[in-house]
Image (tube, grey):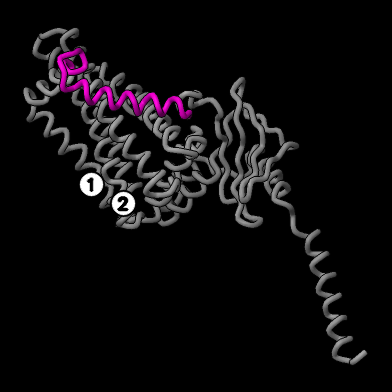
Amino acid sequence: MPKNLAALESFNWVRWAWLFLLSFALASPEEVARGFVARWLAGEVSPSLREVLASPPEDLPQALDRLFAYPPPPRGLRVNLEAPLVEGDRVRFPATLGEEGGEVVVYLRGEEVERVAFVRKDLLPAFAKSEAGGLFLLLLGVYWASALWGRGALARLFREALALLRQERRLYLGLNLLLYGLFALGSLLAFLEPGLARAVQKGIGGALEVIGLEEALGGFLPLLAAIYYWNLTQGLVLTTLLPGLFLGLPALLLNASRYLLFGFALSPALLPLHLYLLHLPTLVLELQAYILGTFGGVLLLLSLLRREGFRVGLGRLLRMGYLGAFVLLLAALYEAVEVVFLLGGRG
């Protein structure tokens, strides 16, 4: 055998032997994830909020980024570390929190853990992430829009709500200027602190993932149902209309902070301009729905100050909620089209 051929064959044997030994040295994805989750549950990974707040200003973006990437596990969380499911760069472990089921998802980049999240399974009801739920909303939207031109109850409520907007137009325009202005202010502040804004953006994205919205990304109809259900229940009813019952001011304060935060996290400082412009109609419509709910809460306060009675003010609040629910449906329709058809499912 020629000398150079023998040397080449010897080199190949050495290389394959080295790769074989290296395969044992590298941990498998499930081993990396299992070890990380064990340390996460033991409190060895997540920074505390006190540590984050005590960080120097220059280190705050990194501290927040770590907090959002490795949030402290909920107290009482039980994880089955012996039943991992590997899906590409993700490893899922079955988990329970009390009687609530879910899973702990570990996101990997090689042998590095990028983030971890406990994803609840039943936070979104089945119909809110189903084809049937989305089809119902699509048909409801067509019927609702057509009914507004008629003489039925839906049209009457719509006209009464618009009349309130005209009657108190200065107050309504003032709320628009205030809340949209806070959103714009947040967007501008993100240019000054892009690192901090990016950390906040990651936190908002993680919060949406925890509710199980990812399960609805498989198609237009499930996504439509999930977006509308979440925005209606959590955005309009629980954090706008219900606080509006307490004389309107809590709803105003909640939405003022929400608009500033959303502007900060969804600024063109962080997003490519074409993506920002593509998503802008969703933001305008969704935030308008919450402005209408906030306006209803302020009308309730004015009704009491004018001695018109709580019942009159409550009726005005509910009419604004009705108008807000319709605007949210328009926003959900556009956002579902945007994510599924314009962005190809990259929500």
Number of the label disc, if any, that sits on residue 276: 2
Quadrant in which residue 18 is drawn: bottom right
Left or right, 227 with respect to 17, comes to left
**Is residue 192 visible from the viewing direction of this image?**
no
Work out whether 295 lies above or below 21: above
> Which amino acid, mark 2?
Tyr
Secondary structure, mark 1, is helix
Left or right, 171 with respect to 254, comes to left
> Which amino acid, mark 1?
Ala
Q: Which of the two marks, 2 or 1, is nearer to us in this view?
A: 2
Percent position of residue 299, x then y: 16, 20
Number of the label disc, if any, that sits on residue 184: 1
Secondary structure, mark 2, is helix
Percent position of residue 144, x then y: 26, 23
Q: Count every numbered label the image shows and give the total.
A: 2
Percent position of residue 111, x then y: 66, 56
